[in-house]
Image (tube, helix red, strand yellow):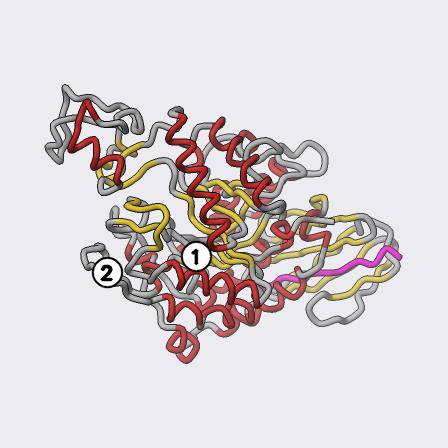
Amino acid sequence: MSKWYEEAVFYHMYPLGMTGAPKENKENEIIHRFEELFAWLAHIKEIGCTAIYIGPLFESTTHGYDTKDYKVVDRRLGDNEDFKKFVEMAHGEGIKVIVDGVFNHTGREFFAFQDIKQNRENSPYRNWYKGINFGWNTPYNDGFGYEAWRNCFELVNLNLCEGAVRDYLLDVIRFWIEEFDIDGIRLDCADCLDFDFMKEMRRVTAAEKKDFWLMGEVIHGDYGKWANDEVLHATTNYELHKGLYSGHNDHNYFEIAHTVKREFDENGGIYKGRTLYSFVDNHDVDRIMSKLTNKEHINLVYTLLYTLPGIPSIYYGSEWGIEGKKEGGNDDPLRPHLVLEECEKNNQHPEIIRHLKELGEIRIGNQALAGGKYRELALTNRQYAFARIWEKEAVIVAVNNDENAAVMTISLPVEAKSCMDAVTGEAVAADGGKITVELKACGSVIIKINQG
């Protein structure tokens, strides 16, 4: 049987944005904005999501990734008791909760950095950061220099080779598991983290909670270096993310199929047997509805997100088809304040939520979609069919990006006792080891196969 996270459908929440919290954390008062987020849990369950990735949550100075205190929930959102209640409520709905782990760097208000500013060479934390140089200076005129993340000097790179730093962060992780009962961590900038530290984290979290999940943000490179039995369970799949929108914009299913075959094909896929974290948008990239040339392709994109190998994730608000594009280096348009009642009342794209609910229902308990082998069955620029196969279960997915209807004749990947449309429940006739499916313009079909 597959693990809970392999069967999961994630809902991605960026709480500072979605609650309209101030951009800078300047007030001493705690504002209990988690009260707004409690109401989202019923909506998340209703659309078929079984896990939440929420963050960043650590007390920070601005956007959440410049950590000030790892053991305190950001006062702009509430306090530790608020988040504890959020996790309890989610677990009560059968929803797992994953948090952002920002362990590559801290903000300048973090206690260790402040101690270095005050005590300089005499600080016991002088080795906690990379590149500390007391003969240099920074744009902040600190009187010393340090290595900053991507030259953003509000983010100071931690020295994860320092034993005291690793011990401190592992203690933080234990605290979050014991205090809040979280189910996993999404590691920010995992491609910047020390591999020995991540391996130690894997051992520690497994000892704390048997089915604890570690997923790393990795954009480029060989995902297998991170997603394996020793380091992390999964990484973000940015390679597939790119194909899912550009393959539709260019009417080029060869791009998507090539990516998936390279990654997951049952014969030679480089990530075969691994599960990666799939998404079509998130807090760092433009909304999917802003990226699609033909908005009618939106349901196709989600069909592939849910049925291709990977763990699907929905970014808050995209279930209503909202748009948003980066403005230069400004991510605010991607992270808007949303009021749940207003979104539900003013839903301009009810077809998206209907489709997501259908996909969620199909995915629940479906071992073929959770971990089944991938096999390409048919491919043209505008039509694409593939199978997911698990023991006696199999699923065929066919998609059509053309603005006209299409008919596909597809060879069955396994012997079939019966075939059924997974959405309508209607029987699908199999003749000579083949099925014929009619695809609407910009439409898809999912066929369940019973092997008997």
Across and down, in percent, residue 343 comes to 40, 74
Which mark's residue is nearer the viewer, 2 or 1? 2
At label 1, the amino acid type is Ile
At label 2, the amino acid type is Pro
Across and down, in percent, residue 92 comes to 57, 67
User: In the picture shown, does residue 431 fall above or below 166?
Assistant: below
The magenta region covers 441-452
- Determine if the magenta segment contains residue 442: yes
**Along the horizontal axis of the image, is 111 left or right of 284?**
left
Q: What is the secondary structure assignment of the residue under circle 1? A: helix
Viewer-closest of 65 and 312: 65
Q: From the image, tell me which residue sits under label 2.
A: 22
Across and down, in percent, residue 363 comes to 66, 60
Task: Please tell me which residue is depicted at 76% across the width and 60% down the height of the picture.
Answer: 448
Q: From the image, tell me which residue sits under label 1.
A: 288
**Along the horizontal axis of the image, is 386 left or right of 381?**
right
